[in-house]
Amino acid sequence: MSLITDITRMWLTRTTKPFTFTNEYDSTLEYKYCDNLGLYVHIPFCKSICNFCPYCKEIYNKDKCDKYIDSLIKEIHLVGSGYTEKKKVTSLYFGGGTPALAADRIKEIIDALNEHFIIIEGIGVELHPDNVTIPTLEKLKEAGVTKLSIGIQSFQDKYQNILGRKTVDENKLYDVLSQVKFETISMDFIFALPQQTYDDLKKDIETAFSHGANHIAIYPFIDFTFTKSTVKSIDKREKRKLLDKITNYCLDQGYERSSIWTFASEKQAGYSSMTRDNFLGFGCSATTLLKDQFKINTFSTDEYCNRIDNHNLATSLTIRFTERQRMVYYLFWTAYSTQVDEKDFEKFFGKKLKKMYGLEILVAKLLGFVTEENGIYKMTLKGAFYYHYYENFYTLSYIDKMWGIMREHAFPEKIEL
């Protein structure tokens, strides 16, 4: 598995050198001249832990959560005070964990960010279905939140049982969502679960759009080695058949595809913290992507608070990109939106896409992965599946290894991928 990603990495970066992350970091982050800059805030607390979830999280404790948020606000000011002028940013997303558990303090966090940034495309928050209550939604709306992402996973008991979760009451959900309105209501689902069929997934999507959602995300199940999940994904052939059929269904219904596995019933509806050229991450395990570097904060909430309270950033690891490495990262995550615009690439790097990756583009066309029109490369269904297939390799070879180490060591010396 790692051989595939290693060969691909060496070919695309034109070097045998691995991606090397070290424990050094900058005390001031150079984001002033970054275009299309986004913000991300991580709240790691949950009422219960889903055994399939790979993200940095721990059991909710109010006192610990409050202490964490105090440190989080300090981190925002540490990063933001590097510049006197406010920086325009595209969007702000809260992830976790279950950020809505801190609904009483979300406004404080947003207010701190508003001291340093101007958010122009809205604010999104992830919720567990249990958080979808009128008091919670009213607090979020009052704080300035415009988008919600609800982790449904499935409306069907058989899949909730597989995932170790409880039944979602779709009628109660609809009743609450109809009373407190937001620009985007996104519902997340998992596909490629054991015995999952097209009809099962189609039913979940239909239920979502008829019960308050105007956007859905259908994420593939990935079996991380460090989780306690015993669930196994379906095989490659069945997965491709399922992805193609459900994609065609959504397109036939007139839903707009905004990324590999997201669809919207309304044009203005959107929810994606991934398709941004640059972003600043705040909180434990949060990542920051800038023009020349990528950094990730410690996964330990205690060490995170200690670092921040001592007026130091909680960076655990940093990679300094070579130009080719940054190009690979740019293309990989831009392609998540299902298209790449060569004008955007040239604006970002000052170099033509075809000059840097002309051969790869030609091969992708010949294999039927992409089509080209006016310098915009769009994925075909076949291309989207193989992007997903490679992303699965990438996740298990790189992210699985890095997160596995960082869960055990707050500040590793070095990681090579």
Image (spheres, rainbow, N blue to C red):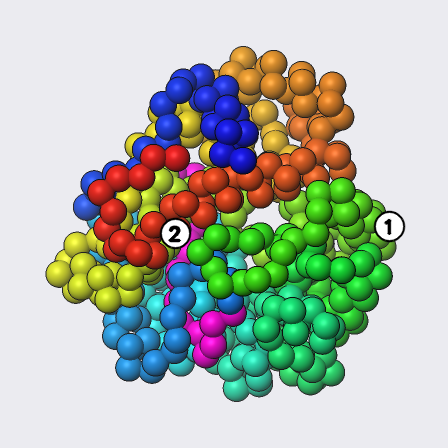
- Identify the element where label 2 is drawn: helix
Quickly name the residue at label 1: 252
In the rendered image, the vertical position of residue 61 relative to residue 261, given as above or below: below
Residue 271 numbered mark, or none: none
Mark in front: 2 vs 1: 2
Q: Residue furthest right?
A: 252
Compared to 205, does 343 lie above or below?
Answer: above
Q: Residues within 10 Å of mark 1 (few under 14, many from 20)?
A: few
The residue lying furthest to the front in this view is: 230
Report the amino acid beneath label 2.
Answer: Gly
Q: Are marks 2 and 1 in contact (CB under 8 Å)?
A: no
Residue occupying image coordinates x 50% and y 29%: 3
Report the residue at 54% width, 35% height from top: 1
Image-based side of 291 in relation to 373, left or right = left
Picture quarter containing residue 336?
top right
User: Picture coordinates of residue 169 (x, y %)?
Assistant: 69, 82
Q: Residue furthest left?
A: 310
Residue 140 shows in this picture: yes
The residue carrying mark 2 is: 404
For image coordinates 67% across by 79% down, the residue present is: 168
The secondary structure type at the circle numbered 1 is: helix
- Residue 73 lies, in percent from the top left, at 28, 66
- The region drawn magenta spans 32-50
Q: Amino acid at mark 1?
A: Asp
Question: Residue at point 61% right, 32% down?
Answer: 340
The picture places residue 258, in percent across and down from the top left corner, at 67, 47
Whichever of labels 2 and 1 marks the residue nearer the N terminus, that label is 1
153 to the left or right of 244: left
